[in-house]
Image (cartoon, rainbow, N blue to C red):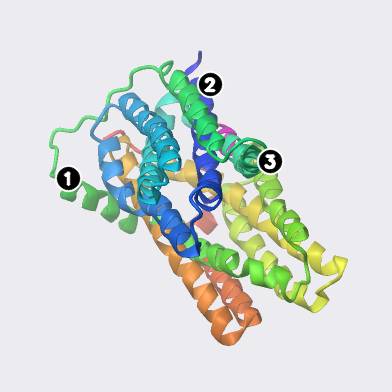
Amino acid sequence: MKPFTALLGAAAGTHAADQLALATLPLTATLILGAGPDVLGLLVAAQSAAWLLVSLPAGAWVDRLPRRQLLIAALGLGLLASAIAVVAAATGAASLLGAAAFAGASGTVVYVLTSVSLLPSLVPSTDLPRANARLELARAIVSLAAPFVAGLLAQHLSPTWGYALAALGAALALACVLALPRVPAPSGTVRPSFLVAIRTGACFVLRHELLRGISLCAIFWNFAFFALLAIWAPLALGPLGLDPASMGLAQSAYGAGLILGALVAPIASRRLPPLATLIFGPAVSVVAAGLFLAAPAHGGTTTGFALAAAGYFLVGFGPMLWLICQTTVRQLVTPLSLMGRVNATVQTAIYGVRPLGALAGGLVAAQAGLQSALVLIAIAFALSALAIVLSPLARLRTMPAPACAA
């Protein structure tokens, strides 16, 4: 098996396991444990906390340890988490289910950081846009399918079958990782302390003008998107006049946008300068915000539904193109010895702002109304576009040369 094929198979299996566990958690908590909204909120928080608490140390591990072994350890943790979740469901232990959720998500964090950092060692730099697009396409497809599969299993068998299927995905990913060549960790003449190593990665991001622009754009965009998710249900069921089925159908346009964006990204990378894609992703999100702002005026009509669905499609399609392009830029400008820590710094900033966006969206909607929350979302999307336009990314006519290895 070719190295990239093995990594692609591992990505599909890992993301399938992660998304199945994500979709199965609330079903298990509600249908088997009888958990209320307060307990469910704590369980979801435990699952998402891994991205905040584990990313920075994981980035340092990626730059210190052999990456194939890290992938194996991450997938092994995913398998263990699935087994713990089944035991938690059988014994009715909500705290144990929360521990399983945190452990499984931690394995995913380590896997994602390791695989993104490993990719430049497996493919030529000219093939990075296409390789990143294929990896993101696999993630988009399983993200779209997992909630539906988990729901079917919960309805016809038991919610815990979702964890069994997640374990199968992790096992298949592990088989693919075992086919990867042994790639040693980047070596350095001096190995700093753990905290100094983490700080070095963060300083590199802050000082590099391209990485700084990428990070600012991602922070504002994720703030806006999670504010949108926080108000989507009251917006859809209220002013838009949608029933739950139509609400879900409109939101599923986001997944369709992700998949199309991943399919188009390799073509865009060949025919367009990077600046075009990097500007288009955030800019089209501003257009989507305008559609969401206009939709309530057509509540209860097909037009209102179409505007909301189009908005979700655009925030899937454009940002997916942007994500693949900026990931390639990030991989090219970062020395291999810093790859894990740089990716971890960006990831921590992104996941750190997500709960703030959700909180801000909900508070503004509660205090000033849904339309005011939509204005906040539009402003944040506009700031994400401005972060690109005002940075050197807006003048990037060709991909940067690969950074030196050290």
Q: Residues within 10 Å of mark 3 (few under 14, many from 20)?
A: some
For the image shown, how many numbered marks are present on the structure?
3
Position of 187 with respect to 339 (left or right) is left
Judging depth in this view, the residue of 285 and 372 nearest the camera is: 372
Q: Amino acid at mark 1?
A: Phe
What residue sits right under mark 3 in the picture? Answer: 264
**Residue at 32%, 58% in the rendered image:** 206
Measured as percent of width and height from the top left, residue 209 is found at: 39, 57
Disc number placed over residue 194 in the picture, else none: 1
Q: Identify the residue at the far bottom of this view.
A: 368
Position of 254 with respect to 360 (left or right) is right
Q: Identify the residue at the far right of this view.
A: 302
Q: Residues within 10 Å of mark 1 (few under 14, many from 20)?
A: few
Mark 2 or mark 3, which is nearer the start of the sequence?
Answer: 2
Tell me the distance, in whole angstroms, between the alpha carbons under discs 1 and 3: 40 Å
Label 3: which secondary element: helix
**Residue at 51%, 26% in the rendered image:** 168
Q: Quadrant of the C terminus?
A: top left
Label 1: which secondary element: helix
Q: Which region of the structure is painted magenta?
A: 128-136
What residue sits right under mark 2 in the picture? Answer: 5
Vertically, is 27 above or below 191? Answer: below
Position of 341 with respect to 116 (left or right) is left
Quarter-of-image position of residue 315: bottom right
Asked whether residue 132 is drawn in magenta, I would say yes
**Residue at 36%, 26% in the rendered image:** 72
Specify the principal SS of the magenta part. helix
Label 2: which secondary element: helix
Asked whether residue 246 is drawn in magenta, I would say no
Tell me the distance, in whole angstroms, between the alpha carbons under discs 2 and 1: 33 Å
**Residue at 62%, 83% in the rendered image:** 369
Q: Amino acid at mark 3?
A: Val
